[in-house]
């Protein structure tokens, strides 16, 4: 009998099996959605186009210092309006329009200075320190009542003191971040580089640096309460983790860890000072998300 070539034999023997596999795969694997069908791409196109344009060009000054573009604040805005899509998507504009309308603004879906200023107010009101400071600078706790972070929790082995509840919440949050793989093994990301700072320490520093009151230095700092901490989220090349240069703030705002904190820190009772991505304050009972 004339033998069929091996390739043909393989074909005939396995054809029915392969066909069956293909059919199974078509049934079992969900159909991939096209871009137009995903939730991120449903929303107003005009507003989206304006947001794309202004993301890195709009002159703003929500905290008093002139900045160009609102990309630094994009993760906070997205979290505030309840969207997981990037700032340049139609869904972002759609959810922003809803947020604006609920708060008495024109629901354009476009990020503008009026919207940014209102967002800033919302974020600042979440910080009890900001609210109480309007009636005078809060008193500092006695240092012996504060808890000391472990060396492994501090940046560069600095002595870090915090309120006991703040340190406990920080530890829970760090454990969760590790569990979600946003802190690579062996890295010092999320290590604390500044915790409690006594009024005397801050006063001496401001006198030394001739910088006693401003956006990044305050004669009445949240750090005097023991509820505030600055954490290492990395730094742009050539910058330190606490550099308030816009390029560094933007770099940090785009890190997976910062985005994780924006989405999760409130569960552990922390609120961010939006101008400084690294500055987080324990504000008490966790906010239900
Ligand atoms: Zn700080």
Image: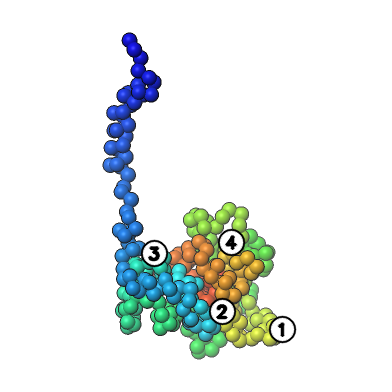
Of tags 4 and 3, the one toward the viewer is 3
Of tags 1 and 3, the one toward the viewer is 3
> Disc 4 and disc 3: Cα gap in Å?
25 Å
Q: Nearer the viewer, residue 276 or 143?
A: 276
> Disc 1 and disc 4: Cα gap in Å?
29 Å
Tell me the residue that label 4 is attached to. Answer: 189
Of tags 2 and 4, the one toward the viewer is 4
Quadrant where the C terminus sits is bottom left
Residue 189 visible, this angle: yes
Relative to 177, is 109 on the left or the right?
left
Most extreme residue toward the bottom is 135
> Disc 1 and disc 3: Cα gap in Å?
45 Å
Q: Nearer the viewer, residue 233 or 144?
A: 233
- Picture quadrant where residue 249 is located: bottom right
- 213 above or below 109? below
Label at residue 208:
1
Compare marks 2 and 4 and give the one earlier in the sequence.
Answer: 4
């Amino acid at each position: 009998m004339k033998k069929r070539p091996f390739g043909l034999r393989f074909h005939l023997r396995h054809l029915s099996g392969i066909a069956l596999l293909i059919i199974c795969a078509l049934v079992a694997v969900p159909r991939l959605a096209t871009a137009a069908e995903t939730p991120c791409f449903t929303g107003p196109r005009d507003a989206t186009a304006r947001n794309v344009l202004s993301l890195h060009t709009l002159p703003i000054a929500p905290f008093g210092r002139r900045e160009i573009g609102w990309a630094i604040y994009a993760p906070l805005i997205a979290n505030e309006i309840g969207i997981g899509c990037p700032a340049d998507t139609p869904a972002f504009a759609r959810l922003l329009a809803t947020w604006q309308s609920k708060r008495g603004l024109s629901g354009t879906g476009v990020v503008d200075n009026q919207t940014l200023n209102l967002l800033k107010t919302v974020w600042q009101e979440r910080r009890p320190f900001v609210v109480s400071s309007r009636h005078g600078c809060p008193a500092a706790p006695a240092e012996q009542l504060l808890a000391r972070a472990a060396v492994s929790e501090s940046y560069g082995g600095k002595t870090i003191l915090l309120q006991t509840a703040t340190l406990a919440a920080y530890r829970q949050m760090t454990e969760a971040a590790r569990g979600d793989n946003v802190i690579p093994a062996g890295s010092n990301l999320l290590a604390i580089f500044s915790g409690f700072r006594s009024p005397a320490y801050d006063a001496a520093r401001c006198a030394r640096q001739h910088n006693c009151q401003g956006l990044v230095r305050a004669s009445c700092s949240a750090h005097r309460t023991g509820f505030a901490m600055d954490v290492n989220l990395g730094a742009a090349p050539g910058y330190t983790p606490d550099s308030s240069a816009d390029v560094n703030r933007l770099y940090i705002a785009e890190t997976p860890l910062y985005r994780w904190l924006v989405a999760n820190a409130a569960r552990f009772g922390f609120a961010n000072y939006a101008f400084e991505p690294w500055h987080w304050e324990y504000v008490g009972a966790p906010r239900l998300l």
